[in-house]
Every structure is written in structure tokens, then in C-alpha cells.
Amino acid sequence: MSVLVEIRKLSKVYTRGREKIEVLHHVDLDIEQGDFLALMGPSGSGKTTLLNLIGGLDSPTEGTLSIAGKRIDDLGEGALAKWRASNVGFVFQFYNLLPMLSARRNVELPLLLTRLGAAQRKRNAGIALDLVGLSERSAHKPSELSGGQQQRVAIARAIVSDPTLLVCDEPTGDLDRQSAEEILALLQQLNRDHGKTIIMVTHDPKAAEHARHVLHLDKGTLVDRPEAVLA
């Protein structure tokens, strides 16, 4: 497999008044295309910061970050937003669905940034909802769906534009165990059957077991290399 994400000497420093807080320190990491990587670590370890940098939601203070051969660490805000819209799907702990829109219309939202016509947007949203097993709920609003179903809608929204990378920040953190298992099984399916590269931040060791590799951070530093947890 080829390397999709290449990170070299990546650091992130935040300034609070006169104090400088280094959240990530000289991180080196390669993530292969088609991997499913879980990022674990205590609160404040830098895992969400690393996820946000990979997803183009933030820019590093030092170091280089390349995805599919493209340097994104030195992109301006506008160029980074354009790159992010075309290449990254986001799944968060809280589903961030618009309450007045149906499931299908929520899934369509990323496609409004494309040149697709209304009919094609509707068709693509339907395909994404079918992929997550919710085609029969496409007309339902978020309040009419369970937490697990809302997260499925959020995943459909994340994959509807066929992104290069799927980044998930505690995607099961607000779900009961059964719903969490269903969401994790869905992520495994997207990885295994559809070749999606997934990076997931989680505090839950049981969630991490669904990934192909687990990576631990502590105080902004990798404390081990990725090790396979699945055959």
C-alpha cells in the first residue's frame, strides 16, 4: 500500500498571554492508504489536535504535513478550506445535524459546495444513506431518529462526496454500547469493503479494538509506533 498521510517533525504551539503551550512535539508518522487508525491518549495528550491538523481544521506551528502527495501545512486559509471540502469527511461525537432538515437534506449539505445539480445531489445523498442502512429514513428529521441513526446520517454526510480521508473524533462517545458497536461495525465496513482511510480519536479501548492499528500519544509525543490489532 502507498503512504497517504506523511507527517514530519510536526509541532503545534498555542499562545495564551505570554505563555506558550506546546501541544504536539516533533511528531513523525506515516499512515497508509486504506488504514483504519485509532488515536488514543489521556486528555491533553494532543490526539484531537493531531486529528484536526490532518483534517485541515488547523495549521501546524512547525513541520510538514502531506496528504496524497500534497503539502497542506503551508496552505492559506482559503486554499485549505477548498482542499478540506474535497478531501476530508468529518464525523464528530455530537452529530451536528441541522434540526429542520431531513436526513437526506443533511447529507446533501457538503454537495452544495460542488457543481452538482439538484437531481445529482439527491441521488448521491440517497446512495450514501443506503450505504449506512438508512435509506428508508431519508425523509425523517433528526428529532425523529435515535442517536445511533443520527450518527449514521452524519457518517453518510461525511462520505457523500467520496473523500480521500475520513476523520472521526469520538464518534461513539455519545452512544450506548449497542449503538456504538453498530457505528464501529459500519466504520469497519467502510474501511474493509470501500477502502476508506479512517483516523479515529477515542478514549474507549473497546472502540479502538475495531481499528487496524492503535497509536498512543502522551504530552504531545508518540509513545509507540502503530501496531496491528486486527489480522
Image (tube, rainbow, N blue to C red):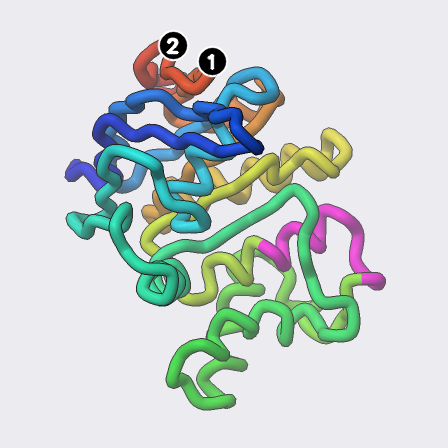
Judged from the image, the secondary structure of the residue bearing numbered disc 2 is loop
Cβ atoms at labels 1 and 2 below 8 Å apart: yes
Q: Residue at the spot x=56%, y=32% of the render? A: 16
Q: What stretch is highlighted in magenta?
A: 143-154
Tell me the amino acid under the disc marked 1. Answer: Asp
**Residue denoted by label 2:** 223
For the residue pair 142 and 177, the one nearer the viewer reads as 142
| Residue 85 x, y percent position in the rendering | 41, 64
Q: Is disc 1 surrounded by few (<14), some (14 to 19) or many (20+) residues within 10 Å?
A: some
Identify the image quadrant of the N terminus.
top left
Q: What's the amino acid at mark 2? A: Val
Mark 1–mark 2 distance (CA, rounded to whole Å): 6 Å
Q: In which quarter of the image is the C terminus?
A: top left
The residue tagged with tag 1: helix, strand or loop?
Answer: strand
> Label 1 belongs to which residue?
218
Q: Which residue is drawn at 19% across and 37% down?
A: 3
Q: Residue furthest right?
A: 143
- Name which residue lies at 42% across and 30% down: 13
Report the front residue among 16 and 65. 16
Q: x%, y% of residue 171?
A: 61, 40
